[in-house]
Amino acid sequence: MVFRTAYRILGNAADAEDVLQTVFLRLLRRDPHTAVLEKEESYLRRAAINTAIDLIRARQAHQTVELLEEPTGPAHDSGELRQVLGKALARLKPRPAEIFALRFLEGFSNPQIARMLGLSQVLVAVVVHRTRQQLRKELGVYLGERS
């Protein structure tokens, strides 16, 4: 589940394996008395999402060569679009990125996400809506659409 979640965000098996290793190393370092068994799956999924997004952010911070031209035409492969989406997710604040990934990459409903994160369903719906608008605007520019 951790590998699959990371792979959906990163689109690269090697990076997803790195995320898997990082998540389980963090889990081993946790105090075993603080873990609640029924929440472990939720913890692992959220940890995979956050670690994958952190990996994207770290790579963006280390980029030193700027592109002279930005892509203006439609994406020709889903891998390229996945990279653009990953970079857009990395620019989001952590909570909206996590909620978006849980909703659209992992397929959880708003009520499920609200329970997982201890938030109200209304707040989750608002964050999903605003995040979709922001990502649509950013991806629209990439795809050459006018927003």
Image: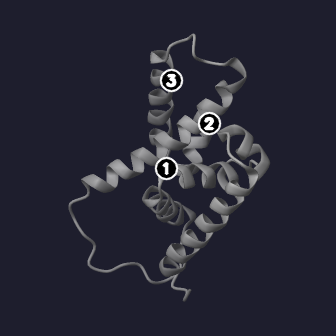
Picture mark count = 3
- In the picture, the quarter occupied by the C terminus is bottom right
Across and down, in percent, residue 78 comes to 57, 64
Mark 1 vs mark 3: in front: 1
Question: Where is residue 108 drawn, in percent x and y?
Answer: 74, 47
For this view, does 76 lie left or right of residue 4? left
State which tag comes first along the sequence, 2 or 1.
Answer: 2
Give the mark nearer the N terminus: 3 vs 2: 3
Check disc 1 and report its element: helix, strand or loop: helix
Q: Residue furthest top?
A: 33
Residues tagged 1 and 3 counted as in contact (Cβ below 8 A): no
Separation (CA) of disc 3 from disc 2? 11 Å
| Spot occupied by residue 139 in the image (x, y as percentages of width and height) | 53, 73
* Circle 2 residues within 10 Å: few <14, some 14–19, many ≥20: many
> Is 86 situated left or right of 102 in this image?
left
The answer to whether residue 75 is seen in the rendering is no
> Which residue type does callout 2 highlight?
Arg
Q: Amino acid at mark 1?
A: Pro
Secondary structure at badge 3 equals helix
Residue hosting label 1: 94
Instruction: Please state, as top left, top right, bottom left or bottom right, where the N terminus lies in the image.
Output: top right
Q: Which residue is mark 3?
A: 24
Identify the secondary structure beneath mark 2: helix
Mark 1 crowd level (few <14, some 14–19, many ≥20, 10 Å Cα):
some
Q: Which mark is residue 45?
A: 2
Q: Nearer the viewer, residue 43 or 5?
A: 43
- At x 56% / y 55%, what residue is drawn? 96
Position of 144 relative to 117 (above/below): below
Using the image as rendered, state which of residue 6 and residue 11 is in the foreground.
6
Residue 87 in view (yes/no): yes
